[in-house]
Amino acid sequence: MADACFGIRGTARELPAELDRNFLIEPGDGRRFVLKVTPGVRDFEELDAQVAALELLARSELAGRVPAIVPAAGGEFLVRREMADGSEHWVRMVHYLEGLPLAHLSVRPTSLFEDIGGWLARLDLALADFDHPGARRRIPWDVRRMLELADSLDLVEDHDRRELVAAHLERFERLVAPRLTELASSVIHNDANDHNLLVDSRGAGGMRLSGVIDFGDMIHTVTVAEPAIAAAYLMLGREDPWPAASALIAGYHAVRPLSSVERGVLPDLISARLCASVLMSARSRVREPDNEYLLISEQPVWDLLEKLKMSDSDDGRRAVDTACSGVHSAQEIIAIRRRHLGHNLSVSYRAPLKIVRGQGQYLFDDHGRRYLDLVNNVCHVGHCHPHVVAAGQRQMAILNTNTRYLHDLLAEYVLRLTAAFPDPLSVCFLVCTGTEANDLALRLARAHTGRRDIIVIDHAYHGHSPSLVEISPYKCEGPGGEGLAPHAHKVSLPDPYRGPHRGKDAYRLYAAEVERAVEDIAAKGRRVGAFMAESLIGCGGQVVPPDGYLRGAYGAVRDAGGVCIADEVQVGFGRVGSHSWAFESQGVVPDIVTLGKPIGNGHPLAAVITTPEIAASFDTGMEYFNTFGGNPVSCAIGLAVLEVIERERLQARALEMGDRLLAGLREVQHRHDLVGDVRGLGLFIGVELVTDRESQAPAADEAADIIERLKDRGFLLSTDGPLHNVLKIKPPMVLGADDVDGFLTHLDEIVARVKT
Ligand code: PMP
């Protein structure tokens, strides 16, 4: 059948199963499959729901950790087969998931329970938006239907046991049933017992949950039943059962925070599952009176039910509270920040978000709500990219030292990083932040030229150290600033939309300002040392300078013996789509390039790339040592980021998605006068809002309002620019076409409703 339906030929061995018949199929090439045969053909919806859920999970962070479906020769996942005896079955095939069932493990560390909790929470979050008619079915294992099982009470022969279950049911009726509608509900696995949880004990991090199998009981019910069910099974056979539950719940809560109602009912949901187990077993015993196995397997459940009844009813509540302590509400965190963090650190949004998890282009808040992250260019290859995470974790467990020892990863990384630059940029310094990179760039330029005077662009931001604040107009000329340092000279922001020069000569006129600044410095009896500029300008309002600007500016500075520094902290690593580096889009090669943000996908890593000549000038005898810069973990992560960019062809994707986004935004601009300008390259885009296209009066309040409304619809971005009226778009590069289209639809609706 495996061959006929799925084109997989191999040896077959039947595996134990309850309802389906499962066969392990081994083609002999190392691969293993499970052929699942479900008798009867009435349950199509139910099986289809399972298949759809597994399909969804195969595209989530849990890929490879739930059974992956193998399509049949015709592409379908469920095949209807008639047997020799005329009976019909549904047949499907999944990849065999490696791992040891938790039930077979004699030693079970608490850390494993936490891992299981976190894993189940991720599973629930991955299924949060999933629904299917086949998952909305009535089964006795639905904890919400607990009271319907009461009619089986009479089947429990032993009087004391009957009373025990009755007491638990009474509590359920009194304390849980009235609150069921207040609980979040979603599709859950609904049967995380220790035969369905697979463990990998060989990994470097100790015992970890490697996967979950058997989605046969999957239904749409109260989400909190998931950890309750898993806890119920983990507590069996333990002298003191609550610490096991507490560990599991802590792991779950850290990923999918439980609401106070969920926390309140959790202990009673655990008992409910145990009651369901013994009542279902009593029903089975009526059908199979001689099955001794039923009696034996029931014993630990009875013991636990007894224990839970005997123990102080506060034990469960305390265990849940302990598990969820250390986790603060958004309001509490705001209060703590106010008390213990400097106040000049604002949070985004009128009602700040508590983000608890990231995956790809998405962020998730403490209510499990998903947001498309359109503004974070740090998580360049996607939040928590598994390849990057694994590289960091692996190296962290092996070695983390500094660069005074020889290390393969440092060698490999600098080879790979410098290879990405045009000649003569071939020497790099590894540091930890964009500020450090730019600060070092200033030192390199001074060492090479022997001069301090620097030309910067109006509204530019280059870092938060004193050396950079005093040359960043965005900071030193803003609130609390002390003005530009005497050695800093600013030129106009080369903004073709709003700046002083527009039209086809704009590039020349902006570059001429740089020339004039060079002359002004000379007039003071000094000479220009450097020109520092972002190749596309971020804080200035996502500005794309007119073509030819950097060529002219660089020429003027170099003619006077100065060096040119390209700050690519925001815009490097393929973001502009057409090139690896934004300076390439202007046809120039800088003397010094600084990199940050995306380089480590969130890990504090940054770099300066320069020429051998400039590096030689900096070699004055004074050591340059950076404690953390270039450590093996950072190098492992930096390498992994480069690998993902290449493997997933993210630069090409930035171009494709950027063009799609720009085209869509231009349509929005066409429909709504509020949108004055749409500009950008690849996935670095600005949308400038104006209340009047003629006067270009900035629509700052409207921009802030749009940001809030987009957040309410699940899209995160922010505003920037000197007038705070530019929507800043610079998402992770893994953005998809559906993301772009969804965003455009919502933006269009929101802009249409904004009153100017
Ligand atoms: N340069 C630019 C262009 C930046 O945008 C930033 C950070 N926003 C920095 C430098 C400073 O980087 P960091 O915050 O990593 O020090």
Image (tube, grey):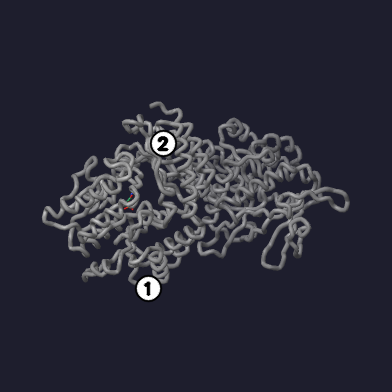
Q: Do the residues labelled 1 and 2 touch (CB within 8 Å)?
A: no
Amino acid marked by disc 1 = Leu
Whether label 2 lies within 8 Å of ligand 1 gets the answer no
183 relative to 422 in the view: left or right: right
Report x, y in % for residue 85: 88, 51
Label 1 crowding class (10 Å Cα cut-off): few <14, some 14-19, many 20+?
A: few
Q: Which of 268 and 681 is in front in this view?
A: 681
N-terminal label among 1 and 2: 1
Residues at marks 1 and 2, CA–CA distance in whole angstroms: 48 Å
Locate residue 270: give its quadrant: top right
Q: Which of 619 and 218 is in front in this view?
A: 619
> Against 112, is 711 above or below?
above
> At 47% across and 46% down in the image, what residue appears?
659
Question: Farthest residue toward the left?
Answer: 525
> Against 660, is 392 above or below?
below
693 relative to 363 in the view: left or right: left
> At 35% across and 58% down in the image, what residue appears?
606
Using the image, tell me which numbered label, if any, was put on residue 83. Answer: none
Label 2 crowding class (10 Å Cα cut-off): few <14, some 14-19, many 20+?
A: many
Residue located beneath label 1 in the image: 406
226 relative to 295 in the view: left or right: left
